[in-house]
Amino acid sequence: MLRKLDYIASLGVNTIWLLPFYPSPGRDDGYDISDYRSISPEYGSIEDFSRLVEAAHSRGIRIIIELVVNHTSDEHPWFQRARRAPEGSIERDYYVWSDTTEKFADTRIIFVDSQTSNWSWDPVACAYYWHRFYAHQPDLNFRNPAVVDELLAIMRFWLEKGVDGFRLDAIPHLIERENTSSENLPETHQLLKQIRRVIDTEFPDAVLLAEANLWPDDAREYFGDGDECHMAFHFPLMPRLFMALAKSSSGPIRDIMEVTLSIPSQCQWAIFLRNHDELTLEMVSEEEREFLWDTFAADKRARLNLGIRRRLSPLLDQDRRRIELLHILLLSLPGSPVLYYGDEIGMGDNIALGDRDGVRTPMQWSADENAGFSTATPSALDLPVIVDPHFNYQAINVDQQDGDQHSLLNWIRERLCIRHHYPAFARGGMDFVEVDDHKVVAYVRSLGDQHILCVINLANQPLATSLILSDFEGFVPKELVGGQSFPAVAARPYTLTLQPYAYFWLLLEHRYTC
Ligand code: GLC
């Protein structure tokens, strides 16, 4: 990682979100933690970690790590102690136990493909224990104040090591209650407020980023009144970007933005296209899910739970126009964009691998053995590198794209650079622009005097469209990549022509008249 920091900096990325690196049996790729205060020897040592944090900070890059505390591994000493501890003891109550599987019956199962119940029998405790994910991941009991203290101590431990924040894994599921869905309970929000108070008092620069895969109203609640998480992944938006593209319609984007735009002023959405999990379709209607499955996962092996286990480029049939289009949305809609490693070079996946492994294969750095990812013998790699005809590492890798002016990598770099240059993208407000064609989505991002008009053709056909830009009469649109000026906005609707899946980012410049 130390050797790759310059690459990350060269992208214009200012924060790294590290997936779990803790000691773990590795049955959920590290989301099954057996020790929260150290680093799995596979990855290095605490000293290595400190070196990484220092090196990242010296380049202006922050490090966000995973705080996976909804559950532990069943190998964690807390669980081993709990199952042997007397009923009613503080140690036993680190986890959630029951004599029957009837309790919390209204709570859904998340990993529907592999789990049939949220309860599993523990023969040592002679009781069932609660788990929202895999059976080897017992849920911690946050009604026990000792568990809350442990959580705060873990946070302090890593913040003192210099980390800049946490992704709060599976945060809606922290606390459960009878006759509810056991998600987003007021108790969970109270706990988040308590965590936030500690952060504000002791580590005011740290960031809490919620992983709350929920409907818009519920997702927004993770900001509280600005007193819970600073950031939350925009799960409601993500599938609707794919929907807008598949339906060639601005409707899904407009609808979701209208209900998620207003958030407390010090908070921000983290928007994304793909991540290390399946592309979740939990928060769309059944009909929409079927449509998205049919469109993007016709091959049933690509489906997992209620989602699609594919990377961005294969989802879009390696179509550069659509890959660009989704990035244009990602980089210009309100929120901080989060990129998933490898998507910047259009990496492929391997649906023959189990679970979500297919989207977690080694980064393709070069055409060298193991894609330049490791010098181990290939059979010793955790997951094989991609070798299929369209996405193999000899053809798709950083080395190759670095030197190609027209590569996806350099295209993305350039867009990130532009985005960085115009703060309206990051912090500006957003107003949709009226257009005469629902195949086009258009909006203006504004911050002070800076106004950027984004116009995107979601359809696979060329078209001319008219935009109502009455507030900008007399302004001159300047295209942000090439710097060319377009005709000034007049009193009548403004006409633009767009190739299939084409887009413009236009700075609206005021032309002063004396
Ligand atoms: C989160 C992680 C996912 C993991 C799950 C259970 O959703 O993103 O990878 O499997 O939590 O820990």
Image (cartoon, grey):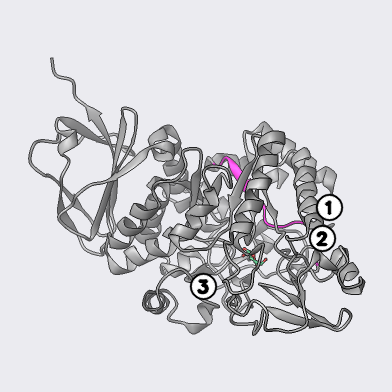
Q: Quadrant of the C terminus?
A: top left
Residues 341 and 172: in front is 172
Specify the quadrant of the image occupied by residue 305: bottom right
Residue 233 visible in the snapshot: no
Q: Position of residue 185 (x, y in %)?
A: 59, 62
**Residue tagged 1:** 38
Residue drawn 50% across and 38% down? 266
**Residue tagged 2:** 23
Please rate how many residues cluster around mark 3, counting C-alpha atoms within 10 Å: few if below 14, some from 14 to 19, many from 20: few
Q: How many marks?
A: 3
Is 230 located above or below residue 372 in the figure?
Answer: above
Please rate how many residues cluster around mark 1, counting C-alpha atoms within 10 Å: few if below 14, some from 14 to 19, many from 20: some
Q: Report the Cα–Cα distance between label 3 and label 1.
A: 40 Å
In which quadrant of this rendering is ligand 1 seen? Answer: bottom right
Q: Position of residue 346 (x, y in %)?
A: 49, 60
User: Please, what is the three-letter code of the amino acid marked with disc 3?
Assistant: Pro
Q: Report the Cα–Cα distance between label 2 and label 3.
A: 36 Å
Q: Secondary structure at mark 3?
A: loop
Number of the front mark, 2 or 3: 2
Residue drawn 45% across and 51% down? 407
Disc with the residue nearer the chain's start (1 vs 2): 2
Label 1 close to label 2 by CB (< 8 Å) = yes
Question: Relative to 158, is 460 on the left or the right?
Answer: left
- Mark 1 lies within 8 Å of ligand 1 (Cβ measured): no
Residues 336 and 463: in front is 336
Q: Report the Cα–Cα distance between label 1 and label 2.
A: 7 Å
User: Please, what is the three-letter code of the amino acid marked with disc 2?
Assistant: Pro
Q: Position of residue 462 (x, y in %)?
A: 19, 59
Question: Relative to 198, is 79 on the left or the right?
Answer: right
- Label the magenta part by its dominant secondary structure: loop
**Which residues make up the magenta segment?**
13-24
